[in-house]
């Protein structure tokens, strides 16, 4: 199968929901041999297949914010009841670096946060995330933590997705996100991350029937033409 696409169709910067930076439009047309097997194309370019969020943006109903606040109140109560809050606090995992980081940012930008659909109004936040935030920001009382999260809710979010999934991606900093959000890779991306050492050229393909390809990402450049990362 050959995928033909213009990177002009790339989403605007910060469309990804799990990573902070994104891609800019790029006008060149690309022709890619797409494998049907394990991701290794004939010309040595590895393809990374990821899903594509096709949902529309919709205005944020007040009811969703109310449910988020309820969940946060319960999580803060859970944090108070932890026997060893400092020990239980979830870590802030760093964003992947180097070539893996470049591929991951590109993939999540193209995909527009398909995996965030499970976030609903809880965003995977729990007492361990609250323990981390309370320790990092001791000047904030519980009301202030509630306000901090509530103010991050975007005016519009992707339909049926996480309450923080706005038009430019996740509105939470890594320090405020759940450990799950900071560490999750979907199958295609996770498969690439495990074998990244052997990849020199990568094209990310987002979608199913209609594929959106990225420009060719190379390890030597780590900054592909047309991408700002
Ligand atoms: S981890 Fe996978 S599904 Fe989630 S945003 Fe990134 S590419 Fe999309
Ligand atoms: S908080 Fe929500 S939008 Fe942000 S990464 Fe997690 S699931 Fe996605």
Image (spheres, helix red, strand yellow):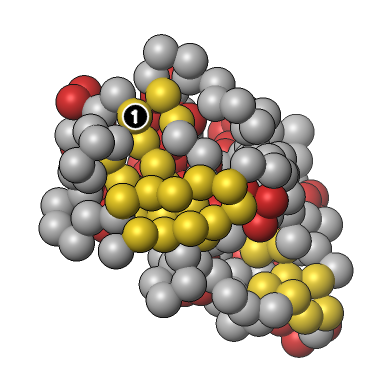
- Total numbered circles: 1
**Residue 117 visible somewhere in the drawing:** yes
Q: Nearer the viewer, residue 26 or 48?
A: 26
Occupied quadrant, residue 154: bottom right
Q: Is residue 110 above or below residue 192?
A: below
Occupied quadrant, residue 68: bottom right
Q: Nearer the viewer, residue 16 or 148?
A: 16
**Residue 91 visible somewhere in the drawing:** no
Local packing at callout 1 (Cα closer than 10 Å; few below 14, some 14-19, many 20+) is some
Q: Quadrant of the C terminus?
A: top right
**72 sits to left or right of 79:** right
Q: Return the x and y of residue 34 as percentages of the image width and height.
A: 29, 55
- Residue at the spot x=44%, y=49% of the render? 31
Q: Is residue 61 above or below residue 164?
A: below
- Residue at the spot x=51%, y=46% of the render? 30
Query: Mark 1 near ligand 1 (CB under 8 Å)?
Result: no
The residue that mark 1 highlights is 201
Q: Is residue 70 above or below residue 125?
A: below
Q: Return the x and y of residue 199 as percentages of the image width and height.
A: 25, 28
**229 sits to left or right of 60:** left
Q: Return the x and y of residue 60 as percentages of the image width and height.
A: 80, 78
Residue situated furthest left in the rendering: 37
């Amino acid at each position: 199968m050959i995928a033909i696409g213009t990177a002009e169709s790339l989403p605007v910067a910060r469309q990804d929901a799990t990573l902070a930076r994104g891609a800019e439009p790029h006008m060149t047309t690309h022709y890619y041999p797409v494998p049907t097997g394990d991701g290794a194309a004939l010309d040595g370019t590895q393809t990374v297949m990821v899903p594509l969020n096709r949902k529309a943006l919709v205005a944020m109903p007040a009811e969703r914010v109310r449910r988020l606040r309820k969940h946060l109140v319960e999580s803060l109560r859970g944090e108070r009841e932890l026997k060893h809050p400092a020990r239980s606090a979830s870590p802030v995992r760093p964003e992947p670096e180097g070539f893996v980081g470049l591929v991951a940012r590109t993939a999540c930008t193209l995909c527009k946060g398909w995996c965030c659909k499970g976030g609903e109004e809880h965003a995977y936040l729990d007492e361990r995330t609250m323990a981390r935030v309370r320790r990092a920001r001791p000047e904030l009382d519980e009301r202030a933590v509630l306000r901090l999260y509530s103010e991050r809710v975007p005016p519009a979010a992707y339909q049926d997705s996480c309450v923080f999934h706005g038009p430019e991606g996740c509105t939470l900093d890594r320090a405020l996100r759940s450990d799950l959000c900071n560490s999750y890779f979907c199958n295609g991306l996770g498969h690439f991350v495990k074998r990244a050492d052997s990849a020199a050229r990568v094209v990310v393909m987002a979608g199913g029937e209609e594929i959106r390809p990225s420009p060719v990402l190379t390890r030597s450049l780590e900054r592909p033409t047309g991408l700002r990362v």
